[in-house]
Image: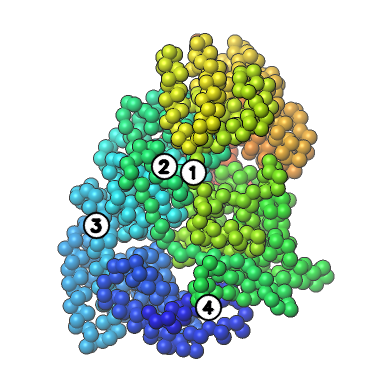
Amino acid sequence: MTNMLNIWIAESESWQSFIDFQLPSSKRAKYTFLPKVDYFYISIMNNALSLINGEITSAEERKECLELAKALEIFSLENKRDHFNGVNKKINMLFTAGLYYLSDYPASSWILSNLYPSDLYPEKIQIFLSCFLSRKLDNKNPYCRILNDFLKNGDIELIESLIETFEKEVENQFEKNIATYFSYSLGLSLIKKFSKNNLWYDVLIQRNSKSFWKPFVKKNLDKAFPIWTFFPSQREALNKGILISNTTTLQMPTSSGKSSLNELIIYNEFKNNPNAKILYLAPFRALASELKNSIAKSLGSLGIKSKTIYGGSFPTIDEKRSLSEINLLIATPEKFLVFENSMPDALKEFSLVICDEGHLLEDKQRGLSYELLLTRLKSRTQSSIRFIFISAIVPNLEIVNIWLGGRENSSIHSDYRPTHLDFAFLERMKTKKTGYYLDVNPTLKYPQRYQLYKYLFDEELTLVKPKRKKKKINSNGGLSVAVSLKAIKSGNVALFAPHKRGNIGVEFLVEEALAQLSYYEENPLTKFASTEFLNSLTAYFSKIFGEEYLLTKSAAQGLLFHHGDFPQGVREIIEDSLRLGHIRLVICTNTLAEGVNLPIKTMVLHSISRFNPALREKREPIQLRDLKNLIGRAGRAGKETRGLIIVPNKKDFERVKLLIKDNNFEPIRGALYNLIQELTQKIINQRILLSEETIEEADETFQKLIDSIDLSIVDLLSEEFEISDFEKLLTDLLTKTLSYAQLNAEEKGTMNSLFEIRGEKIKSLIQTGDFKYLKKSGATYRLFKDINEKVDFQNEIWQKQLDPLDSNWLSFILDTILFNLNQYKIELEEFLSNNGDLPLTNDDIKEAIKMWVEGNWYSEISAKINVEVFQSLRLINLFLSFNVHRIISTVIKIAETRIETTSLSNSILIWPSLLQFGISNELQVDLLNMGLIDREAVWALSNSIDSAGYRYSDYDSLREYLITNGDQLKLLINGDVPKISLEKIGSFIDTLQNRFLF
């Protein structure tokens, strides 16, 4: 292409942005391609036809193809096409989508081609092109019938016959009809590429058996976004042997086809061995939940039975039983460790382990469990395990690969991303009037770098309304919100903040957004959702949080926010609102980046540093690799053709430039490495001489680190081994951790000393026979000792079948046990201190527990114990559902293992689940375990079941009853149940009736 054409193409991208954001038209006159648009279009088509008629094989040719596609699309897209005359917009879109396909961007090709249905085209070749690119075949079309037969059976001769037909037509039409000639030329180029780049071609290379792959291919063809071809990233993984029985580490950018590739890996494992057991480790609960509703369902239709476990401290009866019935277990690492502690033989079951979001090996909350579990798994001697380790952001992937047992050449890197991502910095304009422009692609050179002037200007920065004081937008928060509200014109927007509250927090930005919207004559957010939808959303949040809670008020204005205080059910409702296109703007922390796929066009980064009280500056930058994972959520394949990252704060520009250039990404360290490094630093700074005595006398911060060491020892060891082998076994396991090889000599010395000292503590429990109780309890050594000293395991109450709110039971488990345990006292003090010194007493905690288990919501609990709703939200979802739940679960687990003569009553065994989820009986627990996670829906459906006269007996009987009587039960539900919860019940019963095993 000529230099002038390159300039014009770059200008056309800038022009598109001006149109998308509806910026002042006065600035558009500077685009030099506009006065010569006819010549511009002819030049694009000439270059496109030259490429189409040749072989597009090199990266440079594919890049040129992509640039031409971007230039052509403006002549067919809504709000842009009407600026041009003389172009057949429908035919132009065929060439646009075709060029995207030829440049290896099939997801963008699919989106664009679906904008113009095939019945709009007059000629059979054009109809075929539309059907091929949109993946909607019309069997009335002869070419579509041939292609359809190929997709069903994988007979390559059919594609070869199509190529031969198109070659003849290209030759025939050259003299007859030039437009038809161009269409056949495009069709020939597409089919030639497709002949060696389709699902059948790639899977048959792996295993030459059509019957083996046919169910998998058919399933992919039938998806909402039909998969006919693999992305280049997926093909690279296949070509490098990811289906071969070797450990593999894989780095793929977000949205580059990880889920489909995992489906293929699991299907292949299952088909090779129908009794195979596959473990899919998903470090986030949100990711595990999404996998349950995506991969698990998809593979279920192929005969692969699955179970998803996350949350809760101990496996339920159903979870234990289901392991023998399934092929695929999806689990968070911490949940699986607890699972394995309760079922020591569980590790022996698995032949394949998929490690998703692998960079979380270093995560402070999740990393230690992840690293120790993988150490245990790879140290297993009974049989070999194959690992597939996947992450978008691990710069030192080869080290992890070797650690897991992979060969030197089994580490796979791919930079392919199926949608383009642009960056833009918000800069102040040098004009008399206040204004800001977007500096797009600031690290590139002109013309790829361009400016969108007057992005925010004048009246957009000084909001006025009759009888109200003017609102000037000049703060960082105000600008971030204004930028986001402007960006909704081009698609869904996520405004990121690193904290929930404070002046760089989510809720602060929500308040700012509501304030700005109050000045608008017409709220731009509410036009994307029906009044009925917003009313149902508001009614749901009002029931849960109360009318005055911020989420309730923001939902009424078409705005939602998302952070870690919300329970999983509420998070999913927020995410679904985005997926369905009802909500255009969400303000969020990084919880929205926890492996969840959402259609986000633009992401605005309010701040990329977070509060850290341990530092002198009180702030630290977010790691670049975490930022890369976050921004990867913008521009999702199959939803958008491109994404945009906007940075409004000037002090973040330089760090974001490092991100854009992929510079200085932090290597992954094992979580144990970070723990030992921190301990070593404390030992040096505080001049501690390591001994049992100095450890016992150390402060609580140090003690918590020691707790992690104790847990590491327990998690590394199996329940049964010879005590004479203890030191050797522990040393061997330690040296097999990822962290060990990363520590320096001094840090290894600290590690060895600590594990030796704490190992003696654990060894003493082995000698007394208590280690098996500690192992099954999942407790720290400190908590285990405290529980054993203070809990009466001989009390007859352990065998009684009790109401969950029985006064004697509550007095025993709370007043006598929980409130007297040191761990509880420490954690309560920390929780109250971290939440503005909340004046809560143990009586308040007890009252909150009672109300929660009775089915009350946050607003009601807040009113009773005199706290704000956001405080009761944190009390319930963080302190009670995590801290208190963990301690009480541990107490009950120790009681279950110690009281060997008789079994604990079931009402006591399920009590931790009742506390965690705010429910009151075993029937409700089973509804949760079957997949109904909306608490309001659980209460409504259980009440309906009770009113129908059903007498609960067990999980299986309840499941069959719901399958048979589900439709009748829906009719019995009380009329004041929110519509959203009713829809959840309907979907839940429909799923049960489809008989998927989750």
Q: Which numbered tag is attached to residue 668?
A: 1
Q: Is residue 660 visible?
A: yes
The three-letter code of the residue at mark 4 reads Trp
The mark closer to the camera, 4 or 3, is 4
Disc 4 + disc 3, Cβ < 8 Å: no
Disc 2 + disc 4, Cβ < 8 Å: no
- Marks 4/1: CA–CA distance: 41 Å
The mark closer to the camera, 4 or 1, is 1
- Marks 2/1: CA–CA distance: 9 Å
Rate crowding at label 4 as few (under 14), some (14 to 19) or many (20 or more) other CA atoms within 10 Å.
many
Secondary structure category for the residue under label 1: loop
Disc 2 + disc 1, Cβ < 8 Å: yes
- Mark before the other along the chain sequence, 3 or 1: 3
The three-letter code of the residue at mark 2 reads Ile
Residue 475 percent coordinates (x, y): 73, 62
- Residue name at image x 50 percent, y 11 percent: 767
Q: Which numbered tag is attached to residue 399?
A: 2
Numbered disc total: 4
**Label 3, on which residue?**
201
Image check: 507 left or right of 624?
right
- Marks 2/4: CA–CA distance: 45 Å
Image check: 550 left or right of 334?
right
- Marks 4/3: CA–CA distance: 40 Å
Rate crowding at label 1 as few (under 14), some (14 to 19) or many (20 or more) other CA atoms within 10 Å.
many
**Label 4, on which residue?**
15
Secondary structure category for the residue under label 4: helix
In this view, 528 is above or below 545: below
The three-letter code of the residue at mark 1 reads Ile
- Marks 3/2: CA–CA distance: 33 Å
